[in-house]
Amino acid sequence: MPSFEKSPPSLVRRFDEIAERLPEARRRQMFGYPTCVVNGNLFMGLHQEDFFLRLGETDRHSFVASFGASLFEPMPGRPMREYVVVPPDLLAGPGVEVWASRAFAFAQALPPKLLSTAKKGPRPAGRT
Protein backbone atom coordinates (compact mmCIF):
# COMPACT_ATOMS: atom_id res chain seq x y z
CA MET A 1 0.00 0.00 0.00
CA PRO A 2 1.43 3.40 -0.91
CA SER A 3 2.27 5.82 1.87
CA PHE A 4 0.75 9.27 1.64
CA GLU A 5 2.26 12.49 2.91
CA LYS A 6 0.22 14.93 4.94
CA SER A 7 -1.01 18.08 3.25
CA PRO A 8 1.11 21.17 3.97
CA PRO A 9 -0.27 23.32 6.82
CA SER A 10 -0.70 26.30 4.46
CA LEU A 11 -2.92 24.18 2.18
CA VAL A 12 -4.99 22.98 5.14
CA ARG A 13 -5.46 26.60 6.25
CA ARG A 14 -6.62 27.57 2.74
CA PHE A 15 -9.01 24.61 2.71
CA ASP A 16 -10.43 25.75 6.06
CA GLU A 17 -10.92 29.31 4.76
CA ILE A 18 -12.88 28.05 1.76
CA ALA A 19 -14.88 25.51 3.79
CA GLU A 20 -15.95 28.23 6.24
CA ARG A 21 -17.71 30.01 3.34
CA LEU A 22 -19.86 26.92 2.79
CA PRO A 23 -21.65 26.59 6.15
CA GLU A 24 -24.02 23.85 4.94
CA ALA A 25 -21.07 21.58 4.14
CA ARG A 26 -20.07 18.90 6.60
CA ARG A 27 -16.41 18.31 7.22
CA ARG A 28 -15.07 14.78 7.24
CA GLN A 29 -11.70 13.06 7.19
CA MET A 30 -11.01 10.68 4.34
CA PHE A 31 -7.80 8.66 4.52
CA GLY A 32 -6.53 11.25 7.01
CA TYR A 33 -7.23 14.26 4.78
CA PRO A 34 -9.88 16.95 5.27
CA THR A 35 -12.88 16.84 2.95
CA CYS A 36 -16.32 18.42 2.68
CA VAL A 37 -19.57 16.66 1.87
CA VAL A 38 -23.17 17.69 1.39
CA ASN A 39 -25.97 15.13 1.73
CA GLY A 40 -23.23 12.50 2.06
CA ASN A 41 -21.68 13.44 -1.32
CA LEU A 42 -18.02 14.43 -1.42
CA PHE A 43 -17.38 17.70 -3.28
CA MET A 44 -14.08 19.15 -2.03
CA GLY A 45 -10.98 17.89 -0.31
CA LEU A 46 -7.26 17.59 0.06
CA HIS A 47 -4.94 14.76 -0.84
CA GLN A 48 -1.26 15.26 -0.18
CA GLU A 49 -0.48 18.55 -2.01
CA ASP A 50 -3.65 18.52 -4.11
CA PHE A 51 -6.81 20.53 -3.51
CA PHE A 52 -9.60 18.88 -5.47
CA LEU A 53 -13.17 19.72 -6.43
CA ARG A 54 -16.00 17.60 -7.81
CA LEU A 55 -17.68 19.28 -10.77
CA GLY A 56 -20.44 18.44 -13.20
CA GLU A 57 -19.43 17.62 -16.76
CA THR A 58 -19.87 21.10 -18.27
CA ASP A 59 -18.13 22.87 -15.39
CA ARG A 60 -15.37 20.25 -15.35
CA HIS A 61 -14.58 20.73 -19.05
CA SER A 62 -14.65 24.51 -18.62
CA PHE A 63 -12.41 24.33 -15.56
CA VAL A 64 -9.82 22.14 -17.28
CA ALA A 65 -9.84 24.30 -20.42
CA SER A 66 -9.68 27.62 -18.53
CA PHE A 67 -7.01 26.75 -16.00
CA GLY A 68 -5.03 23.91 -17.57
CA ALA A 69 -6.14 21.74 -14.66
CA SER A 70 -5.89 17.97 -14.53
CA LEU A 71 -8.22 15.28 -13.29
CA PHE A 72 -7.67 14.22 -9.71
CA GLU A 73 -5.66 11.02 -9.64
CA PRO A 74 -4.95 9.92 -6.04
CA MET A 75 -2.99 6.91 -7.31
CA PRO A 76 -1.23 6.73 -10.68
CA GLY A 77 -3.53 5.34 -13.33
CA ARG A 78 -6.62 5.71 -11.10
CA PRO A 79 -8.28 9.04 -12.03
CA MET A 80 -11.50 10.05 -10.34
CA ARG A 81 -13.51 11.16 -13.36
CA GLU A 82 -15.65 13.89 -11.76
CA TYR A 83 -12.83 15.49 -9.79
CA VAL A 84 -10.27 18.12 -10.80
CA VAL A 85 -7.12 19.39 -9.13
CA VAL A 86 -7.19 23.13 -8.46
CA PRO A 87 -4.02 24.77 -9.83
CA PRO A 88 -1.99 26.68 -7.20
CA ASP A 89 -2.47 30.05 -8.96
CA LEU A 90 -6.26 29.72 -8.79
CA LEU A 91 -6.15 28.40 -5.24
CA ALA A 92 -4.25 31.50 -4.08
CA GLY A 93 -6.97 33.91 -5.24
CA PRO A 94 -10.66 34.47 -4.60
CA GLY A 95 -11.72 32.75 -7.85
CA VAL A 96 -11.50 29.32 -6.26
CA GLU A 97 -14.43 30.17 -3.99
CA VAL A 98 -16.74 30.44 -7.03
CA TRP A 99 -15.65 26.98 -8.17
CA ALA A 100 -16.01 25.54 -4.66
CA SER A 101 -19.59 26.88 -4.63
CA ARG A 102 -20.23 25.21 -7.98
CA ALA A 103 -18.83 21.94 -6.63
CA PHE A 104 -21.10 22.28 -3.60
CA ALA A 105 -24.14 22.91 -5.82
CA PHE A 106 -23.30 19.91 -8.00
CA ALA A 107 -22.98 17.56 -5.03
CA GLN A 108 -26.10 18.99 -3.40
CA ALA A 109 -28.11 18.15 -6.54
CA LEU A 110 -27.00 14.51 -6.43
CA PRO A 111 -29.18 11.93 -4.67
CA PRO A 112 -28.36 11.93 -0.95
CA LYS A 113 -26.23 9.14 0.38
CA LEU A 114 -27.68 7.67 3.50
CA LEU A 115 -25.06 6.94 6.08
CA SER A 116 -25.62 4.01 8.36
CA THR A 117 -25.34 4.89 12.02
CA ALA A 118 -25.42 1.26 13.11
CA LYS A 119 -22.06 -0.23 13.87
CA LYS A 120 -21.45 -3.56 12.29
CA GLY A 121 -20.49 -6.20 14.72
CA PRO A 122 -20.16 -9.95 14.59
CA ARG A 123 -23.12 -11.75 13.10
CA PRO A 124 -25.23 -13.60 15.61
CA ALA A 125 -24.90 -17.35 15.53
CA GLY A 126 -27.68 -19.11 13.69
CA ARG A 127 -30.14 -21.37 15.45
CA THR A 128 -29.56 -25.05 15.36
Image (cartoon, rainbow, N blue to C red):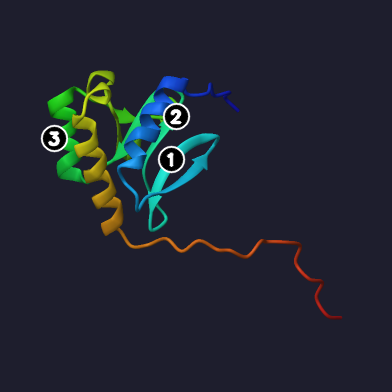
Can residue 89 be seen from the camera position used here? yes
In the shown orientation, is residue 23 left or right of residue 125?
left
Quarter of the view holding residue 119? bottom right
The local secondary structure at tag 2 comes to strand
Which residue does the image show at 23% across and 32% down from the upper left?
Answer: 96
- Taking 111 as reference, is 68 above or below it? above
Q: Earlier in the sequence, mark 1 or mark 3?
A: 1
User: Which residue position holds label 2?
Assistant: 47
Instruction: First in sequence, mark 1 or 2: give its number.
Output: 1
Relative side of 16 to 87, left or right? right
Image quadrant occupied by the N terminus: top right
Three-letter amino acid code of the residue under disc 2: His
Give the Cα distance between marks 2 and 3: 22 Å
10 Å crowding of disc 3: few (<14), some (14-19), many (20+) = some
Identify the amino acid type marked 1: Thr
- Quarter of image, res 46: top left
The C terminus is located in which quarter?
A: bottom right
Amino acid type shown at disc 3 = Ser
Q: In this orientation, which residue lies closer to the viewer: 92 or 86?
A: 92
Residue 79 appears in view: no
| Number of the label disc, if any, that sits on residue 78 | none
> Which numbered tag is attached to residue 62?
3
The numbered dot on residue 35 is 1
Q: Is residue 75 left or right of residue 127?
A: left
